[in-house]
Amino acid sequence: MKKIKLSYFALLSVLILLWLLADKVFTARYGFQDFKLSIIYFTGTLAIGCMSVGMFLSIRPMSVEPFLGGLDKSYRLHKWLGVSALVFSVLHWQCIKAPKWLAEMGWLQKPVHKPAVPTSGTLPGLFNLLHSQHRLADTVGNWAFYASVALIAVALFKRFPYRHFFKTHRLMAVAYLALVFHSVVLMNPAYWHSPLGPAIGLLFFVATLAAAISLLRRVGRTRRAVGAIVDLTHYRDNRVLGVTIKLKDRWFGHAAGQFAFVTFDPAEGPHPFTISSAWHDDGKLSFHIKGIGDYTKNLSETRKVGDLVTVEGPYGRFDFGGNKPRQIWIAGGIGITPFLARMQARELPTDKRIVDLFYSTNAPDEDFIGKVKHMATIANVRLHVMVSGKDPRLTPQRLRETVPEWMSADVWFCGPDGFGRALKEDLVANGLRDGDFHQELFDMR
């Protein structure tokens, strides 16, 4: 989370600094209308800056995974930027509309509109061309703003069906391109002669390419493989479906703990699932999918052996690295999946670290738990199964008492976000190094 916060605040800080260098709001004697115009430019700069970086992250670029710590972290930053773009866009719109409303009510004097004057060095022809498009850019920006607000609100509304969300969210690329036109035409001409101009221009260029990739449906295209379902196992008591896929296309392998986007139904679109098998160079991938929503709970009835699927990936940095002699794995519910893959990888006698796996579930399935126990035995992993309502809850204190050597361990957690945060806070407060707690942020919306 530190790298996400660092990236987020670094972006805002750079945009604010570049705007301060470009605008004279604090160095010139401004009247109200001039100050209002500066704030309009300020909020617009932050809004389009956040939206540009968010658009780039939406195409799942592999280049940022090493720094942010995985695609799940990239998506969390993408969400923060989307919310920030929404807030700054609303403020931008309010700064434009509110004075007009106040003037109509007679509370403010109507402003005298003066044409913008290009600074020295501005190409008159280009300036005149942009100036001639002001009315169109203003109209386009208005409608793009309304569309963006609606699309971001839909993305944040978790109950909106995923099969519709992934289609509507793609329309953000159209709204973004419209807002780029709006921004280029209406931006203060003086900004283009400051460091802000090239910086915004670079963001526009990169994000416009990303928008084109999204609209052309090329996201992750080089990382896709088609396969067929060769096995389905339904664990009814915990509503988990085990799916094994035999790939027909080339797959470059994956590390235990990574995930992939799987398309079972093109109409539904790709869903992210953790890969629950280690890579043995045999073209097979396994997934264990919890029947939670309308789509996943019906997979056992709608899928059959032989069905074709598309797999895109792998993604993620939940890779069980670290140089400590001991590891503690904590799984909540379907969060057991990355540990299933890692236990299979540990069947090879290369990892000598001592491992304790705490598996907490509120829907036990004897067959599934039996499989986990069998894998733990082969992988030489100490397994601690806790069934809600039957066994004592896993608390930080209980974990420390069960593994007295916890201070010499890397902790890997996959489960409910709130439980993970509480566990990390307690362990760090009692001496664990912050960087030794690794948590998957498996929330793509």
Image (cartoon, rainbow, N blue to C red):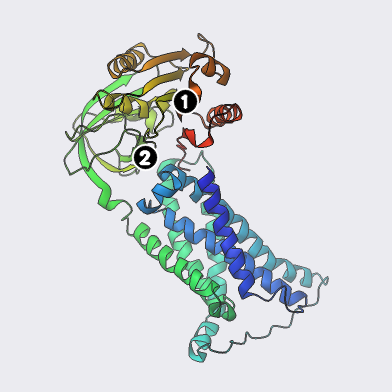
Seen at 38% across and 64% down, the residue is: 209
Q: What residue type is labelled 2?
A: His
Q: Is residue 125 above or below residue 405?
A: below
Q: In this view, does 253 lie to the left or right of 217?
A: left
Q: What element carries label 2?
A: strand
Q: Mark 1 points at which residue?
A: 408
- Residue 283 lies, in percent from the top left, at 18, 36
**Residue 101 screen position, x and y as percent:** 74, 68
Examine the rendered structure and indicate whether residue 393 appears above or below residue 32: above
Front residue of 14/86: it is: 14
* Residue shown at 51% from the left, 47% from the top: 3
What mark, if any, has residue 250 been given in the picture? Answer: none
* Residue 230 sits above or below residue 401 on the image: below
Q: Position of residue 401 (x, y in %)?
A: 53, 14
Residue 153 is at least partly visible in this image: no
In the rendered structure, the answer to whether residue 423 lies left or right of residue 306 reads right
Please tell me how crowded label 2 is: few (under 14), some (14-19), or many (20+) other residues with Cα within 10 Å. some
Residue at the far top: name it.
Answer: 390
Q: Which label sits on residue 271?
A: 2
Residue 14 seen from this side = yes
Question: Seen in the image, is 382 located left or right of residue 347?
Answer: right
Farthest residue, direction right: 107
Residue 274, picture quadrant: top left
Residue 280 sits in which quadrant? top left
Query: Is label 1 in a helix, a strand or a loop?
Result: helix
